[in-house]
């Protein structure tokens, strides 16, 4: 089985090129959302604690079975730990044998940004220039880097109550040829924005954005609310928005949609990708991608990574270890212990 560590993934992305890796991920997600009915899907399995959540996220087609172990612990950063970490496994569906075990903290941030770009492709105005980012933690720069590959962004306004997070955000994006505008409030940050990403971590139901602060035709990518009772937007804004989700059975439990009746939903992302539903229909509607993160996105990026590691160019970047006993007689498992 191939094992990809954080170090191996950093080298892989550096060798492929960060822009090329981001584009490959977004394209792969688009292909896989476009073949939605090939997948066996279910809401993720979540265990909730007062301080966070630990989840298992499976998704499979006839060839591969994938799952991710992931958490969400908003208070972790106060102890110097990441809010979200992940580990993933991809297996051969025909034998059940594992093929790849990978770090998925970085891969989660990348696939989460890729699905944001995909949503923006169908729901944002194609001429979006001004992005506002609310919440400047671990995910935030990935969102900007991926979205600017999709849209002609020139300006990024940003706000986080943690000044150090804002400083880090500005430093990381300082050389990105974007006009960066640090703001004192959410209202200031979203004022005049064409596109808004909410990437806040707080274990509560929030109402971060007042509809009256928004310009007509804005697209909102709400990705920080992803647990029961952990949401970012209020009902007034939701009620005025054209809402798209990844997978309704999961979003009703975890997304902004938990505060709305199901008939307020416009559609699922795959319907925009396969053309069965139009995305944005005019320049004035407010569109909202209520993204909670779906296991298909983990399947897509794990499969992409496996394919790269199977090529001669990148095969040296992972470890290969026997995690399944190599037996001449598959019925003689005991022989491994009896000598
Ligand atoms: N949809 C997905 O697929 C997906 C994937 C990964 C993470 N997430 C979620 O995205 C959120 C952000 O993740 P992260 O890894 O960046 O977390 P993080 O803890 O690194 O950063 C979150 C930031 O939000 C800020 N914040 C909290 N309340 C705020 C408010 N009212 N206004 C502005 N900023 C505020 C915090 O100060 C912090 O800097 C988390 O809730 C996480 O669960 C979703």
Image (cartoon, helix red, strand yellow):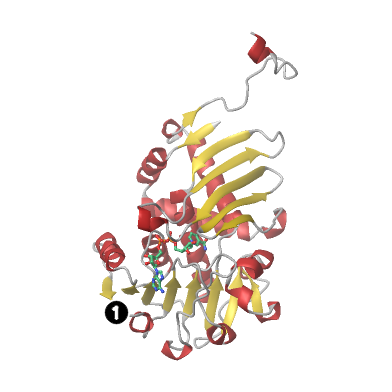
Quarter that holds the N terminus: top right
Residue closest to the eye, 83 or 105: 83
Q: Residues within 10 Å of mark 1 (few under 14, many from 20)?
A: few
**Side of 255 where 132 appears, left or right:** left
336 shown above or below 134: above
Residue closest to the eye, 301 or 85: 85
| Whole-percent x, y for residue 245 in the image | 60, 70
Residue furthest top as drawn: 339
Residue 176 in view of the camera: no
**Side of 334 where 286 appears, left or right:** left
Which residue is located at x 39 percent, y 63 percent?
140
Which residue is located at x 48 percent, y 85 percent?
217
156 shown above or below 337: below
Quarter that holds the C terminus: top right
| Whole-percent x, y for residue 308 in the image | 49, 40
- Snapshot quadrant of residue 153: bottom left
Q: Which residue is mark 1?
A: 184
Mark 1, ligand 1, within 8 Å: the answer is no
| Whole-percent x, y for residue 24 in the image | 48, 53
Q: Quadrant of ligand 1?
A: bottom left
**Side of 90 where 105 appears, left or right:** left
Which residue is located at x 75 percent, y 18 percent?
331
Residue furthest bottom as drawn: 212
| Whole-percent x, y for residue 69 in the image | 56, 48
11 shown above or below 239: above
Task: Provide the secondary structure element on which disc 1 rests.
Answer: loop
Residue furthest right as drawn: 331
Residue 294 in view of the camera: yes
- Snapshot quadrant of residue 243: bottom right
């Amino acid at each position: 089985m191939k094992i990809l560590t954080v170090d191996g993934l950093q080298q892989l992305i550096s060798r492929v090129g960060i822009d090329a890796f981001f584009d490959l991920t977004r394209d792969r997600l688009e292909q896989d959302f476009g073949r939605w009915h090939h997948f066996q899907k279910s809401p993720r399995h979540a265990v909730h604690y007062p301080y966070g959540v630990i989840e298992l996220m499976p998704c499979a087609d006839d060839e591969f079975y994938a799952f991710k172990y992931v958490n969400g612990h908003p208070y972790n950063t106060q102890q110097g730990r990441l809010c979200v970490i992940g580990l993933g496994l991809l297996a051969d569906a025909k034998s059940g044998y594992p093929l790849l075990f990978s770090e998925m903290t970085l891969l989660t941030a990348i696939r989460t940004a890729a699905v944001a770009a995909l949503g923006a492709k169908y729901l944002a105005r194609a001429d979006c220039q001004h992005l506002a980012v609310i919440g400047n933690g671990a995910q935030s720069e990935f969102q900007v880097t991926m979205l600017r590959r999709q849209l002609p962004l020139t300006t990024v306004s940003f706000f986080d109550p943690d000044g150090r997070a804002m400083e880090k955000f500005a430093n990381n994006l300082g050389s990105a040829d974007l006009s960066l505008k640090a703001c004192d409030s959410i209202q200031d940050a979203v004022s005049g924005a064409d596109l808004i990403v909410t990437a806040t971590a707080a274990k509560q139901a929030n109402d971060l954005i007042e509809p009256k602060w928004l310009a007509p035709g804005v697209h909102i990518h709400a990705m920080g609310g992803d647990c029961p009772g952990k949401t970012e937007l209020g009902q007034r804004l939701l009620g005025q928005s054209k809402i798209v989700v990844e997978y309704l059975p999961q979003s009703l439990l975890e997304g902004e949609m938990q505060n709305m009746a199901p008939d307020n939903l416009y559609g699922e992302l795959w319907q925009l990708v396969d053309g069965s539903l139009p995305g944005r229909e005019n320049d004035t509607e407010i569109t909202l991608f209520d993204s909670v993160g779906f296991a298909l996105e983990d399947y897509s990026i794990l499969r992409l990574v496996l394919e790269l590691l199977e090529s001669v160019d990148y095969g040296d970047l992972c470890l290969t270890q026997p995690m399944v006993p190599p037996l001449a007689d598959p019925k003689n498992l005991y022989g491994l212990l009896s000598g």
